[in-house]
Structures are given as C-alpha cells and as structure tokens.
C-alpha cells in the first residue's frame, strides 16, 4: 500500500503562502487560514484514499527564528489535521530533515523506499485541495507500472509526485519541478506516467485559478473541498476582470 506524504508547515501568518498577501487581496492571516483549510482538505482526501497518510512537518529548528513560538510546529500541524480528521490513530507524523525543500522531500522519499518497502511513496502538495481522493488512488495504481508518477500543476510545478524508486533529488523541486523530476527519472531509466492536471496555491494568479474552479464546481453541483470552500465563502472571494476580489475582510 502506498505511503502518501503531505509536507506541511505550521499554518502561521507570514510563514505559509507568503506571496499571497503581496499578489492578492488576502492578508497574512487570511493566507494562513486558507493554507490550514487546504491542508485539512488534502488530509481528508488522502485518509479516504487507499494510501497511508504521513504528515511530514517542518520542525521548529528548520523554521525562521521569528516563526518559532511557544506551540511547537508539530503540535500546530497535529491540531490542524485533527480538526479535519478527529481521530489521528491512523495518521503518521514525522519531521522533515534537510536544509532545502528538495533535500527534505528527497530524504523522506528515499528513507521510506529503502526502509519500509511501501510499494510507492506519493508526495502531495498541501495546497492541492482540488486533486481529491480519486487522483491519489489513480497515482497509486499508475505506480504499479511506472517508477515515477507526476501530477502537473500550473507554471511547471507539481501537485503530486510518486516514486517506487528514488531519483536524483538535488534541487529537483527548486525550479520547474515537473520537467526536472521527469528528466531525472528518464536519466535513471525509469518509466513515467501522469495523473490529471490540478492547481496548487502560492500566488494571486493561483488563487484566481482556485476560486474560478471552485465557483464552477459549486455552480455545477459537483464535489468541492469543504474546508477550502468555507474560507472562500467566508471571504466572498470571486473572480472579477481576471483577478480575485474579496467581499469581506473575513475573521
């Protein structure tokens, strides 16, 4: 059974989604609320899938000094996930190790593959709230025949990356991770497959995509991620003239 890794930061103002307040109407607090909602929705999707959820949190010693507070990073992440899932008995929490994001992801994937033989390790972006359970399950299925499975996101990014064998992870997620990871897989002689395109949220442009898709799903009566939808509705986020507008300051 696949291990599904969700790399997570404690949802603190200014630490998570730092570009959103600079490129959208959201404040640092609202950006943190959106991140927390996204993390909850991703945790729910993974918990409902056929994979085993592992929340891979960034520990206090890897956070900038001004984002270290009395509550530990692990406690903050646990509390966020618990709000969505309630029972955490089937959820693993492990700290990240490494000086960069690419190193931390690489260390986690390599360790799991070498020490646990999970079949596949899937890494899901904590803001891939629209991907859902079916995408996670599809990635697990595709991992049975391809060593690397990629979930494209806008701007050459990834919302999901699955591995049955480790690749060269050095700076793999730093720039254009979609093409970089694919090239590393090809260089290693690995097969590559893909799951459907899905947005992640980092910038105002990403927020525009998210709100557009979410509003379209709501209009069509299709399934939506509950926690993210609650934040979008509370802020009355809508796309006007190609950008997101907020109808309220929120709470």
Image (spheres, rainbow, N blue to C red):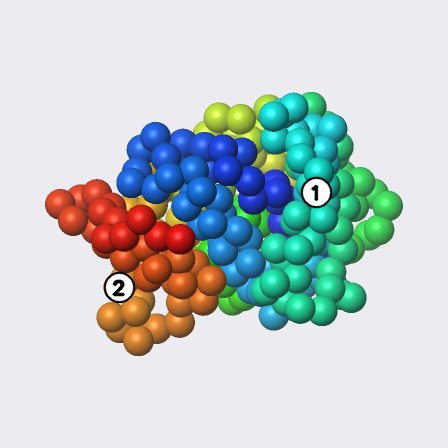
- Residue that mark 2 sits on: 216
Frontmost residue, 58 versus 122 = 58
Picture quadrant where residue 43 is located: bottom right
Looking at the image, residue 4 lies above or below residue 90: above
Q: Is residue 192 left or right of residue 222?
A: right
Q: Residue at x 18, y 44 (%)?
A: 242
Looking at the image, residue 222 lies above or below residue 141: below
Mark 1 to mark 2 CA distance (whole Å): 38 Å
Picture quadrant where residue 95 is located: top right
Q: Earlier in the sequence, mark 1 or mark 2?
A: 1
Q: Residue at x 31, y 67 (%)?
A: 217
Q: In the displayed image of the protein, which residue is found farthest to the bottom?
A: 221
Looking at the image, residue 15 lies above or below residue 88: above
Frontmost residue, 52 versus 22 = 22
SS at mark 1 in the image: loop
Residue 18 placement (x, y as % from top left): 45, 32
Frontmost residue, 233 versus 119 = 233
- Residue that mark 1 sits on: 71
- CB atoms of marks 1 and 2 within 8 Å: no
Residue 251 seen in the figure = yes
Residue 241 placement (x, y as % from top left): 13, 45
Q: Is residue 130 left or right of residue 213?
A: right
Residue 211 seen in the figure = no
Mark closer to the observer (1, 2): 1
């Amino acid at each position: 059974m696949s291990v599904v890794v969700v790399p997570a930061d404690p949802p603190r103002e200014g630490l998570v989604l730092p570009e959103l307040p600079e490129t959208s109407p959201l404040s640092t607090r609202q950006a943190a609320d959106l991140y927390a909602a996204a993390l909850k929705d991703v945790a729910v999707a993974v918990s409902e899938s056929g994979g085993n959820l592992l929340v891979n949190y960034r520990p206090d010693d890897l956070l900038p000094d001004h984002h270290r507070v009395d509550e530990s990073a692990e406690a903050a992440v646990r509390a966020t996930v618990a709000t969505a899932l309630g029972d955490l008995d089937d959820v693993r929490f492990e700290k990240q190790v490494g000086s960069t994001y690419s190193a931390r992801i690489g260390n986690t994937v390599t360790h799991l593959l070498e020490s646990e033989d999970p079949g596949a390790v899937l890494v899901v972006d904590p803001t891939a709230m629209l991907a859902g359970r079916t995408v996670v399950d599809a990635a697990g299925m595709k991992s049975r025949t391809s060593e690397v499975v990629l979930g494209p996101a806008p701007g050459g990014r990834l919302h999901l990356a699955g591995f049955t064998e480790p690749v060269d992870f050095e700076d793999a997620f730093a720039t254009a991770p979609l093409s970089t990871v694919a090239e590393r897989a090809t260089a290693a002689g690995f097969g590559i497959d893909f799951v459907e395109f899905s947005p992640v949220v980092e910038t105002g442009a990403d927020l525009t995509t998210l709100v557009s898709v979410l509003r379209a799903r709501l209009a069509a009566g299709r399934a939506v991620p509950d926690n993210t939808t609650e934040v979008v509705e509370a802020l009355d986020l809508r796309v006007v003239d190609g950008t997101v507008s907020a109808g309220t300051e929120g709470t």
